[in-house]
Image (cartoon, rainbow, N blue to C red):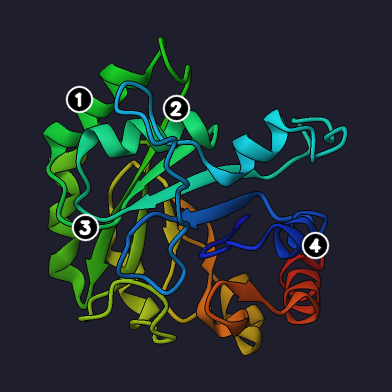
Amino acid sequence: MLIKVCGMRESENIREVAVLGVDMIGFVFWPQSPRYVQMISAQAGIIPDYSEERLRRSQGEYGATADSKTQPKRVGVFVDDMPQNIVTRVFNYSLDYIQLHGDEPRETCENLRLTLDPDIRPGIKIIKTIRVSGVGDFKKCRAYRGAVDMFLFDIKRKAIDGSGEHFDWSVLRQYDGDIPFFLSGGIGPDDAGSVRALTHPMFAGIDLNSRFEVKPGVKDVMKLRRFIQEVREK
């Protein structure tokens, strides 16, 4: 089971979470989110903006990094963003996954992959969020077959991220697609047993966010550590 911790922003908190054995860390690039990762302008129109991390690396503020094979994969979360913004952030943050969290059509997924792979980010993976309130919502998945690598099933609600609520997981039994999925939406410290009980053959992992926060963008490392131990115990 993959564990993705989303909505991270502060460098020290990211380091603390990365050593817990999580598989992915998500960065939210949606300006309306309280977990939004701000870019620093390069103040030049002919080159892309630089991420804070890339600036620090170029200035030698980061020491030697761990083996990339042991580091969590980086996921950029975008909501109906312009393709050029997505491409810029994939480059600046060395993203491994793009999570399209809005109403992006299949064509957006296909065009992003063609733009990025192999010239800019070889092997880039695409996750498409599908909002679920009932069995009928799984029909939306059909439009993305062959265009995305994974789905993320989240609760259907007005808030885009971090609501702390989840949908009725029993409907997952009705998903008959062949694309793996993440489960998201309000998974909290008390849900380890329910997560471990999930047996769907396409269930790939979980997405953790607001229920493990001290404040938006900052995760409670102790809560995460306990939960990860519980959900992965044999």
Residue 127 place in picture, x, y as percent: 37, 45
What residue is drawn where x is 52% and y is 41%?
51
Residue topped by disc 1: 111
Q: Amino acid under label 3?
A: Gly
What residue is pinned by disc 3? Answer: 102
Q: Amino acid at mark 2?
A: Ile
Identify the residue at image location x=80%, y=39%. 62
Mark nearer the N terminus (1 vs 3): 3
Q: Nearer the viewer, residue 45 or 183?
A: 45
Structural distance between the alpha carbons of marks 2 and 1: 12 Å
Check disc 1 and give the amino acid type.
Answer: Asn
Q: Which residue is identified by label 4?
A: 16
Gap in angstroms between the C-alphas marked 4 and 3: 29 Å
* Quarter of the image where one finds residue 172: bottom left
| Residue at x 64% of width, y 89% of height | 190
Q: Earlier in the sequence, mark 4 or mark 1?
A: 4
